[in-house]
């Protein structure tokens, strides 16, 4: 399934970019959002594109080079955006965008272990990550309590205790190595009625492991703090989230800045996809876009 950029026009319209400004796209992915900026402004807006996945950087750079010559690309996590900005000799950026969804290119890529639809090694690491710490490591070495906390905390899985117990019992017989082995454990640990829901029964467990392997929530907290400091007064910060844990962190961070009178919210409620977008791209259904405008320095 080809990647479709979520909330494309809504995100770029609400960044309110102008000629001569600088956009930092902290999650370049397939390059959809930055491509729209390049189509609208050409070389008149500088783009700094970051992604921790080198394959995403390569794909996006090839796409954007046909639209603008005013772009920089770095294989780096957005939690280190301040280092990238400093290395380019830039003091402040005028807009920041974080799209926290895992792209369809990554989800559908074979051999990465993100999908429960194919039987492949239990990696779940973004390219360039720590290959010695992956989903299999967590499943085969963490104790039952730690597994339960990860699955419940990062996946908000109501059957986390049962699933953790099943994982520990199964690994005593055979270590976990593939995605289908994990899917089988989840199915065995959960009631049959749970298998007939809208979500695949392993969805939340896979989400939890992916977040844990890549330390996604810690990176988000760091990226928000560093991003706001790197933003010019009058600049806008937009974040697209896809699950409640991410959204809770972004919502609270933005709310705090508004209460401190260091920012104003651009919309009272999060911007969500239209029914038409959800119909065309079901993966967009849980997306929420939040935007603030910086009013004063820290």
Image (cartoon, rainbow, N blue to C red):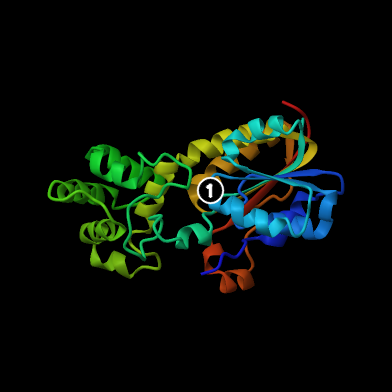
SS of the residue under disc 1: loop
Residue 28 coordinates in the image, percent (x, y): 62, 51
Q: Nearer the viewer, residue 226 or 136?
A: 136
Residue 254 coordinates in the image, percent (x, y): 64, 39
* Residue 258 showing in the rendered view: yes
Q: Nearer the viewer, residue 83 or 171?
A: 83
Query: Which residue lies most toward the top here?
Result: 298
Residue 81 coordinates in the image, percent (x, y): 64, 36
**Which residue is at a point 57% across and 53% down the rendered structure image?**
56
Question: Count of labels shown?
Answer: 1
**Which residue is at a point 62% across and 32% down the rendered structure image?**
225
Residue 140: name its quadrant: top left
Residue 13: name its quadrant: bottom right
Q: Nearer the viewer, residue 187 or 103?
A: 103
In the figure, 53 relative to 141: above or below? below
Label 1: which residue? 53
* Residue 155 showing in the rendered view: no
């Amino acid at each position: 399934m080809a990647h479709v950029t979520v909330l494309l026009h809504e995100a770029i319209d609400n960044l309110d970019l102008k000629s001569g400004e600088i956009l930092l796209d902290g999650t370049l992915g397939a390059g959809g959002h930055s491509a729209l900026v390049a189509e609208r402004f050409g070389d008149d807006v500088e783009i700094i594109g970051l992604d921790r996945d080198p394959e995403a950087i390569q794909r996006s750079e090839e796409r954007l080079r046909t639209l603008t010559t005013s772009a920089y690309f770095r294989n780096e996590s957005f939690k280190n955006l301040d280092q990238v900005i400093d290395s380019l000799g830039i003091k402040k950026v005028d807009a920041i965008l974080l799209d926290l969804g895992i792209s369809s290119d990554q989800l559908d890529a074979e051999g990465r272990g993100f999908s429960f639809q194919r039987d492949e090694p239990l990696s779940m690491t973004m390219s360039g990550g720590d290959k010695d710490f992956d989903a299999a490591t967590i499943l085969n070495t963490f104790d039952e309590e730690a597994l339960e906390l990860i699955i419940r905390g990062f996946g908000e899985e109501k059957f986390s205790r049962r699933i953790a117990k099943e994982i520990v019992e199964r690994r005593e017989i055979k270590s976990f190595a593939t995605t289908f082995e994990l899917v089988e454990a989840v199915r065995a640990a959960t009631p049959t009625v749970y298998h007939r829901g809208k979500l695949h029964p392993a969805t939340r467990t896979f989400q939890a492991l992916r977040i844990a392997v890549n330390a996604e929530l810690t990176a988000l907290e760091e990226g928000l703090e560093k991003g706001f400091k790197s933003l010019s007064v009058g600049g806008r910060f937009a974040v697209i989230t896809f699950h409640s844990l991410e959204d809770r962190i972004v919502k609270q961070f933005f709310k705090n800045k508004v209460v401190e009178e260091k920012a104003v919210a651009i919309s009272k409620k999060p911007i969500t996809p239209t029914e038409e977008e959800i119909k065309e791209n079901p993966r967009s259904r849980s997306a929420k876009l939040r935007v603030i405008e910086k009013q004063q320095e820290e």
